[in-house]
Amino acid sequence: MIYYIYMIRIIWKKILVFPALCVVCLFYAACHQPVPLYGTWADNRGDTFSFFEDGTFSAKVKDSGGTVNIEGNYSILLNALTLSINDGTRIVTEWDIRGNMLYFNYTNEDGVPITMTLYKVSN
């Protein structure tokens, strides 16, 4: 009889652990949202930005001096996009996605902001 009571207690504890684990997993899934920037974005001028899941990016930007290739890290806090370029430059700008179009301002080497309207071309 004691054996059966012991087994019922063990099974009851396992039954209670499973729902708690399910609640934690559902909470994480509901709160964790992937960054919508992942993928490659381009425009008709030849500008391209590729954002990767590991927090890095690479880009090709055309400005008055020609084409500039840049790489670095990016971070997002609400509507603020911070680009930390490997040469030490740091650009903080607001960003917005409407449909498949990404809007933000890129500041070139001369400090002139370039308004970007990029289209999603691949994930």
Image (cartoon, helix red, strand yellow):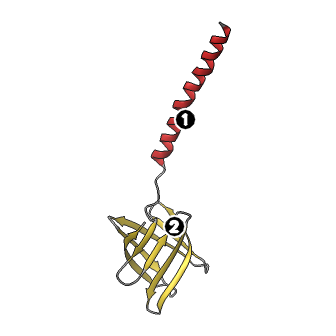
Give 6 or 30, whichever is nearer the viewer.
Answer: 6
Residue that extends furthest to the top in the rendered view of this protein: 1
Kind of residue sitting beneath label 2: Phe
Look at 37% across and 78% down and name the residue there.
Answer: 43
Badge number at residue 52: 2
52, above or below 108, in the image? above
Above or below, 108 against 8 in this view is: below
Dot 2 falls on a residue whose secondary structure is loop
Task: Determine whether the residue tagged by mark 1 lies in a helix, strand or loop.
Answer: helix
- Which residue is pictured at 51% across the width and 41% down the height? 25
| Res. 89 image quadrant | bottom right
- Which comes before the other along the chain, label 1 or label 2? 1
Label 1 neighbour load within 10 Å: few <14, some 14-19, many 20+:
few
Instruction: Determine whether, in the image, residue 66 is placed left or right of residue 17.
Output: left
Quadrant where the C terminus sits is bottom left
Tell whether 34 sits left or right of 98: right
Q: Which mark is residue 67?
A: none
With respect to residue 102, does 43 lie above or below? Answer: below
- Label 2 neighbourhood size at 10 Å, few (<14), some (14-19), many (20+)? some
Say the numbered circle drawn on residue 21: 1
Q: Position of residue 80 (x, y in %)?
A: 47, 66
Q: Is residue 79 above or below residue 41?
A: above
What residue is rendered at 65% in x and 6% in y? 1
List x then y, in percent, for residue 103: 38, 71
Name the residue furthest bottom.
Answer: 65
Q: Amino acid at mark 1?
A: Leu
User: Looking at the picture, how far across and down is residue 85, in whole percent?
Assistant: 57, 76
Image coordinates of residue 56 in percent, x first then y, are: 55, 69
Residue at position x 52%, y 83% in the image: 69
Q: Residue furthest left?
A: 99
